[in-house]
Amino acid sequence: MTARRIGFWFGLVLFALMWLSPPLGGMPPQAWRVFALLLLMAAWWMTEALPLTATALLPFVVLPLAGVLSPREAAGAYLSPILFLVLGGAFLALAIERTGLHRRLALAIVRRSGASAGGLLFAFMAATATLSLLVSNTATALIMVPIAVAVLRAGGTQEGETDGLPGALAMGIAFAASIGGLGTLVGSPTNGIAAGLIERSVGYDISFMTWAAFGLPIVAVAIPLCWAILMRVQGVGRATFDVGAARAAVGGAGAWTGAEKRLLPLLALVVAGWMLLPLVADRLPEDAVEDGTIAIVGALLLFVVPDGSGRPLLNWQEADRAPWGVIMMFGGGLALAEGIGASGLAKWLGEALEGFSTWEPVLLALLLVGLVVLVTEFASNVATASGVMPVVGGLIAATGADPALLAVSAAMAASWGFMLPSGTGPNAIAWATGHIALPRMLRAGFLLDVAGIFLIVGVVWAVGSVVG
């Protein structure tokens, strides 16, 4: 029996038994039924027993039957302003991909890589992480891996070679794509989902700039750290590679097109809007403009601004590739979080977790992040964030810990899984090159996982003490 079938029947049987049995531990009946829903969704999400988006529809059905929310209230719980930030960011990323602006950036950085194999590796990782700030990690890997393979071939690498630079470059792109996605709210759909769940579960509002204040320092430290781990695990310095031939093979991106020239200032305006919003918010009508508003304005302009060839920067056929399923799954997580609060489950969890109130907040954060990193190695990032954040809300209520320290750390950890080829989209894409030896990936991923636990907590604690 496959893991999916086991997850399906285990989750369904557990849900039915809990629904039909009296509550345990003094839990209110409505909270008990929502707890059953939480376990069912966690089981199905983490084993992908059903498509992730299909599982996200369960709160709309179950919460009204549990007497927690009406159908209208349950439907309303699927919406959040951050949803529009994710959607607008997806449209902007699609426009970057359509115009070829992403490849220009990648090639510009790689051509400045220096004369060593280590320099080439770092340049690819830096380019990948930079792209991943605005383009999804999987799309970034799809962009960068073919360029890397061409460079390896030009440098004399044979097909299937895993020692030295080939294995390091394949893993470096995959790891850097996931790390770079942590830098901004639009870098990965998981970030927006986690931010929305934090706001719904904890009441801690995370803007584009707030997330970047935590995420960008993590990216800035993690990329050199990851590079050092790969250099050691793969023995890049001991291997021979013709960097000169490889750099010559990268080529150039050619002259700037009209579409690129028109898209770049539009992107700059959107990013400037996100950066300036905290400074001008008090001059605008209360709660009239959020990060999602700016993202949607930028997205709408994509359909208006011509690209110089008689068409707009983005048309609907291209925009329709947006991650609609992820957005609906985001809504399911929000609805579940709303049910957890409305049913009294959040309050009960807080009381049950009061034993942790004596722990030092940093130690508690380290334990929490370690558990989340372990879970996300075997479950999708989105599923991990959706299942963990409501529990984090109860933990914060019980301990009185800084919401940023626990919630943001857990949100970052949900995307920090590097050991397995199947763990993330970038890992799978890199594995398909044939240049990765599994034992080395496990070793490098494990070292990065362990280092990441301390890095995430340390950066969030340090930044939180400054901005908090």
Image: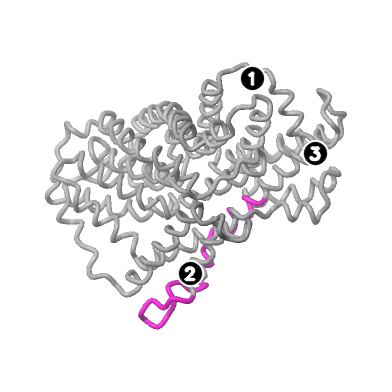
Outermost residue on the bottom side: it is 310
Stretch in magenta:
304-331
- The answer to whether marks 1 and 2 mark residues whose Cβ atoms lie closer than 8 Å is no
Q: Is residue 435 above or below residue 321?
A: above
Residue 247, x across and y down, in percent: 16, 52
Q: Amino acid at mark 1?
A: Phe
Name the residue carrying label 2: 318
- Secondary structure of residue under mark 3: loop
Task: Please tell me the numbered disc located at residue 356.
Answer: 1
Q: Is residue 466 magenta?
A: no
Q: Which residue is mark 3?
A: 343
Disc 1 or 3, which lies upstream in sequence? 3
Q: Quadrant of residue 445?
A: top left
118 versus 196 height, above or below: above
Mark 1 or 2: the one toward you: 1
Dot 2: element: helix
Taking the image as shown, residue 102 lies to the left or right of residue 50, namely left
Callout 3 amino acid: Ser
* Extreme-front residue of the structure: 283
**Which x, y percent locates residue 371?**
55, 27
Where is residue 259? Give x, y as percent. 35, 73
**Image quarter in which the N terminus is found:** top right
Camera-side residue: 204 or 264? 204
Helix, strand or loop under label 1 = helix
